[in-house]
Image (spheres, rainbow, N blue to C red):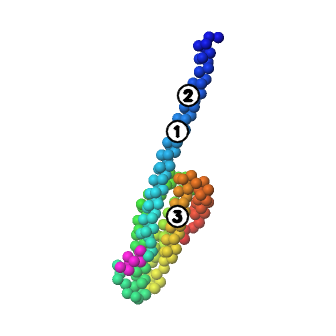
Amino acid sequence: MDPAVIAALITTPTAVLAAVAAYAAGRAQGRGTVDAVRRQHQRDAYAAFLSAAISFAEQMDWRRCIELATRETATSASSESLEAVRRLAAGIRASVDIKPMQDAAILVHLEGPKHISQLVIAAMNQARQNQKDADAAIQDTSTAPGTFALPDPEEGDYAFSRRVAIFTAAASAHLNGDTALAADAQVSAATQVTSRPV
């Protein structure tokens, strides 16, 4: 056989293998780029939700609301004025804007994954419950003095903060590829969604 034909037969499979390897490497690199962009979008969405949740929690903090209400009413020591302070504090609490947190939560829902989204749902449900409790307390103006009723706001604050902390741990585990912590977070997510807000 002609040496040129033999050389062509030997180099052709090598060239085909090299082309296949280059194609596979290109696909892997392209997929890696897509994954990196997706992870950055998730990181941005998680950070936006966490920032909005912290801001919301600071504004909803019962002690802060009591301080603001006390300054506004220049209260005396009578039980009626203490009730007025609590009612005003509940009004401050009920008026906190939840929309920035809702908008950030929508981004987390879009970016996923599902167990992270479920944790955001649990945090949002608790935030809505805290506002609903405060709103119900201020709407009940027909009650006699001394009967102002508001479920323990500090307990509601703690429940919201706890749900945000679980979200934060799960989001961090997901972004950093910590499979053990991510598995724990998925269990927490399932528990959080099925549990009723405080």
The foreground one among 126 and 147 is 126
Residue sitting nearer the eye, 164 or 195: 164
Numbered disc 2: secondary structure: helix
Q: Is 74 on the left or on the right of 148, as rendered?
A: left
Q: Where does label 1 land, which residue?
A: 29
Q: Main secondary structure of the magenta part?
A: helix
Residue at 54% across, 68% down = 197
Q: Is residue 152 above or below residue 104?
A: below
Q: Position of residue 87 (x, y in %)?
A: 42, 78
Question: Looking at the image, which residue sits at the far bottom?
Answer: 78
Residue 19: give its label.
Answer: 2
Q: Residue furthest top?
A: 2
| Percent x, y of residue 2 | 62, 11
Q: Mark 2 is on which residue type?
A: Ala
Front tag of 2 and 3:
2
Closer to the chain start, of discs 1 and 3, is 1
Q: Element at badge 3? A: helix
Query: Could you tell me residue 13's position as x and y percent?
Result: 61, 23
For the image, the number of numbered tags is 3
In-image side of 146 versus 2 (left or right): left
Q: Residues within 10 Å of mark 1 (few under 14, many from 20)?
A: few
Residue in the image at 50% along x and 67% along y: 161
Pointer 2 and pointer 1: residues touching (CB < 8 Å)? no
Q: Name which residue lies at 47% across and 60% down.
A: 50
| Marks 1 and 3 close (CB-CB < 8 Å) | no
Residue that lies at the very extreme toward the right in this rendered image: 1
Give the extent of the magenta segment. 64-71
